[in-house]
Image (spheres, rainbow, N blue to C red):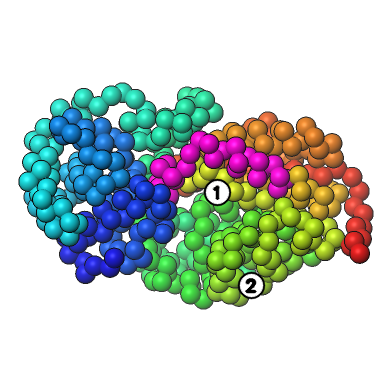
Amino acid sequence: MAYTSTPARSRAIAVETLVAVFNGRSLDDALPHDADPFARALVYGVLRHRTRLEALLTPLMAKPAQPGTPLQALLLSGIYQLLDMDTADHAALNETVNACALLDLSGVRGLVNAILRRVQREHPALVAALPDDPVVQHSHPHWMVRDITRDWGAQANAVLAAGNQQGPMTLRVNARKLSRDAALEQLAAAGHPGRAVVGLPDAIVLDQPADVRVLPGFNEGRLSVQDASAQLAVELLDLAPGMRVLDACSAPGGKTAHMLERADVTVVAIDLDPARLGKVQHGLRRLGLNAELLLSDAADVRRWWDGTPFDRILIDAPCSGTGVIRRHPDIKWLRRDTDLKALGDTQARLLRRLWPTLKPDGVLVYATCSVLRAEGDDVIREFLMTTPDGRPGAISSPVGLAERCGLRIPPGGDHDGFYYARLVKKGRTRTVKKER
């Protein structure tokens, strides 16, 4: 539902978006593309701090608000404005109450007003009474807190806290069109200063986020938006001219484009979602690059492979997304721990099916934007136990923690949470003939 931007309508947009996410829609799908910055900030804030806000609300209601309803979402958004946003209390109170009329909640205006005024008066005591429980303090579901605590130990609180912080806007410079130093100069001259990211020759972090449409060179294909951790993939592939490269789960296409920007290679980019593969094509067109795009399940090798082996393979595998929660806070409320088994099966299947398409002495890079070992080192260790011609290759990175088989990068600062493994196939190169 599109609204003219007014204070009450901005809050109504936020509430409708929150209700949609609480009931199973993704944030990208639920949030109107033309939502104003205030509505966006409100939505992201409530999603980041939902459990804490619910814990603050519960003692203020004789009968708890039904989860996922407009009333609950409106109250959570009002509490967030009062406690966590730079919004004047009178505006937070009045405009949230006014939003009732836009949400078919006119009958509870008095209730909303009374609860929010109690929060305004009593918030120090309400906050002090919150339980010292990471599920509440960090607003992550119990299963995520359990698994992250198990996998990260003393660093768990930092990983959880990072999920509630806004990530920076990171750019990738198209090395075919200009140098990073030149890009930094152009950005600064246009009022968008930034800095280089150590260890990643194409990465720039802007001091402040900006609309890509105003960035000099974006429309001309000189710049793209891509997190620093995602840019590490191309460094680990160690590309050389003439190589044949497979990007097995290519959408939305950032890593495919980065490969082509960095070396004269032939890239086969596969995705099984037509709409997402279209995004890959759109991005390549903007950058003036070309790849062979295939609509397929990459693991269904017999359907698409022509028998010519690859020098390099990137498997950016489907995963829980727990490493990018700071950019996609809806992941906390949409993902279930029961999803991990199916995701793990998919990750293992991709490795098992694609390994035979890699040349001997070739390199396969496995990546997930997950902070869970079940989607990282556990998957690779199990794969290597049944793959005698595979071995873990060395990874050089200024960030992250070395694992038995790979590298895990905690979320925070310049980097989203990621896992990488670099696998080398033993043996001498040989020609693989196409099956007839």
Disc 2 crowd rating (10 Å Cα; few below 14, some 14-19, many 20+) is some
Quick check: 427 above or below 99? above
Q: Is residue 61 left or right of residue 343?
A: left
Q: For the residue labelled by badge 1, is the local secondary structure a helix, a strand or a loop?
A: helix
The image position of residue 432, as x and y in percent, is 90, 57
Q: Tell me if residue 395 can be seen.
A: no
Q: How many numbered marks have been drawn onto this rendered protein structure?
A: 2
Q: Tell me if residue 385 can be seen.
A: yes
Chief SS of the magenta region = helix
Disc 1 crowd rating (10 Å Cα; few below 14, some 14-19, many 20+) is many
- Mark 2 and mark 1 lie on one chain; the one further toward the N terminus is 1
Q: Is residue 333 magenta?
A: yes
Q: Which mark is residue 344?
A: none
Which residue position is annotated with label 1? 229
Q: Nearer the viewer, residue 416 or 105?
A: 105
Quick check: 2 above or below 412? below
Q: Distance of mark 2 from mark 1, alpha carbons?
A: 22 Å
The picture quadrant where one finds residue 164 is top left
Which residue position is annotated with label 2? 289
The image position of residue 76, as x and y in percent, is 23, 43
Q: Mark 1 belongs to which amino acid?
A: Ser
Q: Quadrant of the N terminus?
A: bottom left
Q: Residue at x 42, y 67 (%)?
A: 212
Q: Residue at x 74, y 37 (%)?
A: 383
Q: For the residue labelled by badge 2, is the local secondary structure a helix, a strand or a loop?
A: loop
Quick check: 98 above or below 162? below
Q: Is residue 266 magenta?
A: no
The image position of residue 363, as x and y in percent, is 76, 49
Q: Which residues are magenta?
A: 325-351
Q: Residue at x 59, y 66 (%)?
A: 274
